[in-house]
Amino acid sequence: MSDSAHAHMHINLVGSVFVPVSDPDRSLAFYVDLLGFEKLADFTYGDGVRWIEIAPSSDVSANGLALVSTGEGKAEPSDRALCAFGTEDIEGDHATLRAQGVEVDAVIATAGTQRQGLIALDVTISDPVPPQFSFRDPDGNRFLVVQPV
């Protein structure tokens, strides 16, 4: 692409990650009550479509999640990981999610272990670094949790 094409573009950030949800109230409770996220927006638009945005912390997180209801179209759960979340206590977060009945990987993957692929479960990644595990929300959306080294 030529330098002149770049001069006309004004895109300067990555916005919300769209997460399809079937029950906005259930999803909001999962992310806010269980994961401790903050609700940034909750309003209706168009023909009564609800828009909810959340983030781990509005003070720290540059990006958030938009819990997209079926008013924008129905999506099926996928094995693709939608995004990665960072943590300072991967063992504590893994144990907390398991204790709360959230579907999480059985073990935290790190050097010397394996994890499933981010895009497809039939792919195996050996020696993942840094420590990481996946979990699913109530709609089956898959996310990665990583503790940066």
Image (cartoon, helix red, strand yellow):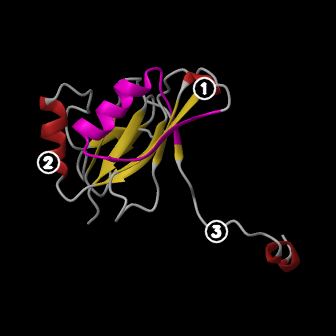
Q: Residue 107: x percent and y percent?
A: 19, 37
Q: Earlier in the sequence, mark 3 or mark 2?
A: 3
Label 3 to label 2: alpha-carbon separation? 35 Å
The crowding category of the residue bearing disc 1, from other C-alpha atoms within 10 Å (few below 14, some 14 to 19, many at least 20), is few
Give the amino acid at mark 1: Gly
Q: Nearer the viewer, residue 103 or 62?
A: 62
As for residue 135 lying within the magenta part, the answer is no
Say whether residue 11 is visible. yes
User: Tag 2's secondary structure?
Assistant: helix
Identify whether 79 is placed above or below 148: above
Residue range of the region highlighted in magenta in the rendering? 18-45
Q: Quadrant of residue 11?
A: bottom right
| Residue position for label 2 | 91
Q: Quadrant of residue 36?
A: top left
Q: Which of label 1 and label 3 is nearer to you?
A: 1
Name the side, left or right, on which 37 lies relative to 75: left
Q: Which of label 2 and label 1 is nearer to you?
A: 1
Q: Are marks 3 and 2 in contact (CB under 8 Å)?
A: no
Image quarter (top left, top right, bottom left or bottom right) of the N terminus: bottom right
| Residue position for label 3 | 12
Give the amino acid at mark 2: Glu
| Residue position for label 1 | 48
